[in-house]
Image: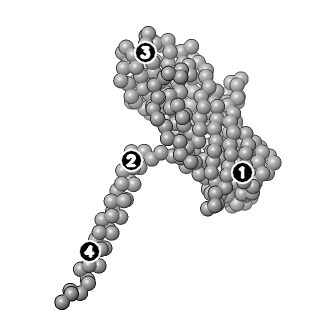
Amino acid sequence: ALLAAAPTNAPATTVTIGPCTGQDYSGGTTTLPPTDCEYVSPAQVHLILAALPDGTTVNLAPTHKAFICERPPGPAPASVGVPACGNPVSGSPTTEVSTSTLEFRVTSAGPGLAGLDCVLRFTGVPMTTLTGARTLGTSPQVFSNEIKSLKTAGITPVSNCNLFSSINLKAGTTEGLGTPSTGTTTLTQKSDGTWLIDSFFDVFYQVDWVGSASGPLAGRSGTNTGTIHMVASAKVPTLSEWGLIALVLTLIAAATILLRRRVFARRPAVA
């Protein structure tokens, strides 16, 4: 196998799994996939490229995020506020259509590849999911979910790795894979009306790749299948977002100090 699931002793980076929250809609549920959450692996390292020189590994740690809802085929929902990803109806399965970003942090070890640390990012990845029947307006709501289709074919990834001349990933029985990518979702309504989302998928995937002619994988290629466990987590701010947060907090602090100085300056002197 040229691409296989990471063994238990694979190097890992700690991933913080935070509570995932979705907004309430008029039908008494929330939209899926969760637009403000990400799907990550608690073990972080999911995939390892094998068939490399002895002692060499390439680890790909994926994050599935930035879900953008697209209205599925068929009549538009009649009620305002129903999520565009689907129109959940009590007692019936729901098809949700979205695009997303699939990002891999690529690290390595071994001869010729030691110290590799780069990013492989696919944007606009189409995905179709099927969620099981639920009873709207109740809490908790527990139901099955399945990725019917997810594929990166035709999408050129943004990368600074110089590893692949092409790499395509797909999942879902609609894409011709015999093993479904299934999981379970539990929605629990909070006191403020929002929904706590506890969701996971066991994703059965296929990856086809060809090494870049000018990179360390030149002359190598492969196809392999495997299964990875993905869990919904609160979105982790990027470095640029942390910078914006820091700027806002700095401006608030500066404004507070300036206001206090003005207040003290206006107070009458004590004789």
For residue 26, what is the image quadrant?
A: bottom right
Q: Horizontally, is 59 left or right of 32 in the view? A: left
User: Which marked residue is nearer to the observer: mark 3 or mark 1?
Assistant: 1
| Residue placed most toward the observer, 249 or 85 | 249
**Residue 4 seen in render:** yes
Label 3 residue SS: loop
Cα separation between marks 4 and 2: 32 Å
In terms of sequence position, does the residue under pointer 3 or pointer 4 come before the other? 3
Mark 3 lies on residue = 56
Label 4 residue SS: helix
Mark 1 lies on residue = 140
Residue at position x 53%, y 42% in the image: 17
In terms of sequence position, does the residue under pointer 3 or pointer 2 come before the other? 3
Mark 2 lies on residue = 240
**Residue 155 seen in render:** no
Mark 4 lies on residue = 261
> Where residue 185 appears, x then y in whole percent?
68, 43
| Residue placed most toward the observer, 198 or 246 | 198
